[in-house]
Amino acid sequence: MTAAVPSLFSRYREPLTAEMRSVVGDGDGLLYRLIRYHLGWEEADGRPGPGAGGKALRPALCLLAAEAAGGNLHACLPAAAAIELIHNFSLVHDDIEDGDRTRHGRRTVWDIWGVPQAINAGDGLWALAGRAFLRCVERGIPVDVTLRAYGLLNESCLTIIEGQAMDLAFEGRSFGAGDTAPVDEHEYLEMIARKTGALIAGALAVGAMLGSGDQATADGFWRLGQHLGRVFQIQDDVLGIWGEEQLTGKSNSSDIRRRKQSYPVVYTLSRGPATARAELAAVYTLPEIDDAAVARAVQAMDEARARERAADLAAQSHAAALDTLATLPITTAARADIQELAAFLMQRQF
């Protein structure tokens, strides 16, 4: 069963987009054209684009936490815009590092303008995020609170980059003595806590800090975000193998072709039956992974019931998120919003 898309995504979309457009601007410079293209606002030739293709999950979490903690939406919008710009900085660079030519059914920035200009676009998104965040002071949030919130975001960004470095390094690992799996479950969970969990947790913590000015409240939202981040990434790994391309907007074979150590792969190679381990290992050691080899890899993971195990692990993190949520001093309405979001992350198909 597929969960309904949470209402909070649409609730914040219009003011968030307006804030981001104000930050990015409409200048003719190439850098800003690349950024607007990536964000879905323009096509490569300058015609209007289809609009943002993502869910804007992280800025929505920031604004939800800010309001739940007693903050003002208008004052916190610059921080939410900064978080979405940083998320997109990471996507532009991820597309380069992963060699992905499409995102949400459109060509990626590097595929059109080349790697060097795409790097510039990602760096520009990073710089614009910092400019955006400082607007919180102009909106009435005290300087000391803004600086503490920005510190939380900056630490999250560094942690994301650490996680991305780990993820890429995992792809190059070979089997150890006795056919030991290249990556174990503990290492995988540590990586996703950094690569994915950090910005989801950071978004919630930043919103809570801006809304309340209280470190303990921000810490509680951070813990909640870590659990939600694990749910998000495990489902993302599942969709990377078994997802429907017309829904996800990305190839469901690229992870395997890159020898990515996603959770179904890690589980199969370390804990699956011997036949499944051997078959998946054989595919991952091929010089080139073609369509037939991708099918063999998926069959091996199916034999290991890796998809079911991923669902079990996501369910455990979902339960931990709800336990943490129960400890937060927030309104009934905000609690219901987060419960709806957690259910969606468990069952999403895109």
Image: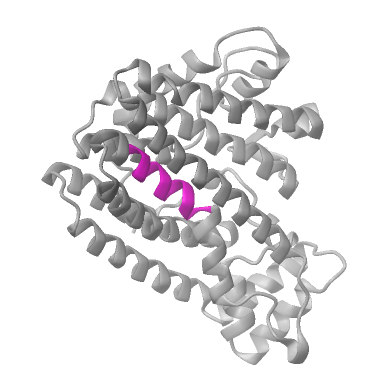
Q: Position of residue 237 (x, y in %)?
A: 55, 60
| Residue shown at the point (56%, 50%) measured from the top left | 160
Q: Position of residue 204 (x, y in %)?
A: 35, 44
Please give left or right for residue 109 compared with residue 137 in the image: right
| Residue shown at the point (37%, 39%) measured from the top left | 206
Residue 248 lies in the magenta stretch: no
| Residue shown at the point (21%, 39%) measured from the top left | 69
Q: Position of residue 136 (x, y in %)?
A: 37, 23
Would you identify the image quadrant in which residue 88 lies?
Answer: top right
The secondary structure that most of the magenta stretch takes on is: helix
Asked if residue 263 is positioned above or below residue 330 in the image, the reply reads: below
Please give left or right for residue 46 compared with residue 65 in the image: right
Residue occupying the far right of the picture: 287
Q: How is the image coloured?
A: one colour
Q: Give the range drawn in magenta.
A: 196-207
Q: Nearer the viewer, residue 69 or 322?
A: 69
| Residue shown at the point (60%, 74%) measured from the top left | 266
Residue occupying the far left of the picture: 332
Q: Which of 150 and 253 is in front in this view?
A: 150
**Quadrant of the rendering where the N terminus is positioned:** bottom left
Q: Would residue 2 be visible to someone looking at this image? A: no
Q: Nearer the viewer, residue 292 or 323?
A: 323
Please give left or right for residue 83 compared with residue 220 in the image: right
Q: Which of 86 and 206 is in front in this view?
A: 206
Asked if residue 290 is positioned above or below residue 286 in the image, the reply reads: above
Q: Position of residue 158 (x, y in %)?
A: 57, 47
Asked if residue 56 is positioned above or below residue 284 in the image, the reply reads: above
Please give left or right for residue 341 compared with residue 36 in the image: left
Residue 205 lies in the magenta stretch: yes
Q: Would residue 263 be visible to someone looking at this image? A: yes
| Number of numbered discs visible in the structure rendering | 0
